[in-house]
Image (cartoon, helix red, strand yellow):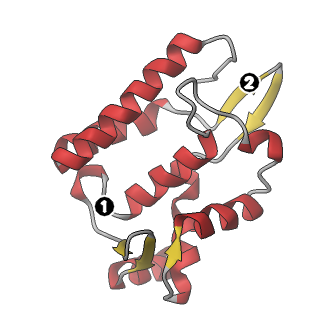
Amino acid sequence: MRWVTGTVAGLQLLIGIVELCIFCLASNAEWGGHIFLILEESVSREYHHAGELMSIPDSRTLFVPVLKVFADDAGHSIEEVRESMKVQFEITPDELIQRYPAGKPIFHVNVALALANLQGAPLGGSKLIEKVGKKGYRITEIGKAYLKQNS
């Protein structure tokens, strides 16, 4: 699926789905997980902006690279994770400013979705990372084992 700048209605629908997913995750992990999987299936990492094809990694593409940030066994903030992914995927300033109509930056949303996946969001899966403090995350033993098998 390709997003064209003029498809505001489609993007607004996507934002609504994301918001519903977040609400469902907060209230019921099973339903939130189902909606999350539907969202991942429908979102592509490619979209058009002013006639130019831009590439922003989706949450599936970010899954293992984000987990690798935590391989040092230290706690990391979402800001540290974003910066690491920005460098690794060579995200341009133009890509960083791309936003959904609701104002959320596309790259930030994709990193947040990857973090949600790593915390077991889809269907209440295994927690490969866990929250520490208000804004930090660290790898779990399950996450370490996953990295060994998938690196």
Count of all numbered marks drawn on residues in the image = 2
Residue at image coords 16%, 46% = 28
User: Which residue is disc 1 drawn over?
Assistant: 120
**Residue 28 position (above or below residue 71):** above
User: Regarding mark 2 in the picture, which secondary structure is present there?
Assistant: strand
Q: Position of residue 114 (x, y in %)?
A: 48, 55
**Residue 49 position (above or below residue 109):** above
Q: Which amino acid does label 1 sit on?
A: Gly
Q: Crowding near pointer 1: few (<14 within 10 Å), some, many (20+)?
A: some
Q: Quadrant of the C terminus?
A: bottom right
Q: Tell which circle, 2 or 1, labels the residue nearer the N-terminal end.
A: 2
State the separation of the CA atoms marked 2 and 1: 31 Å
Outermost residue on the bottom side: it is: 73
**Residue 129 position (above or below residue 26):** below
Residue 151 in the figure: left or right of residue 51: left
Q: Where is residue 89 in the image (x, y as percent from the top left)?
A: 74, 57
Residue at image coords 57%, 57% = 62
Q: Where is residue 77 in the image (x, y as percent from the top left)?
A: 52, 71
Q: What residue type is labelled 2?
A: His
Q: Position of residue 105 (x, y in %)?
A: 61, 40
User: Regarding mark 1 in the picture, which secondary structure is present there?
Assistant: loop
Residue at image coords 58%, 29% = 100
Quarter of the view holding residue 45: top right
- Which mark identifies residue 70? none
User: Which residue is disc 2 drawn over?
Assistant: 48
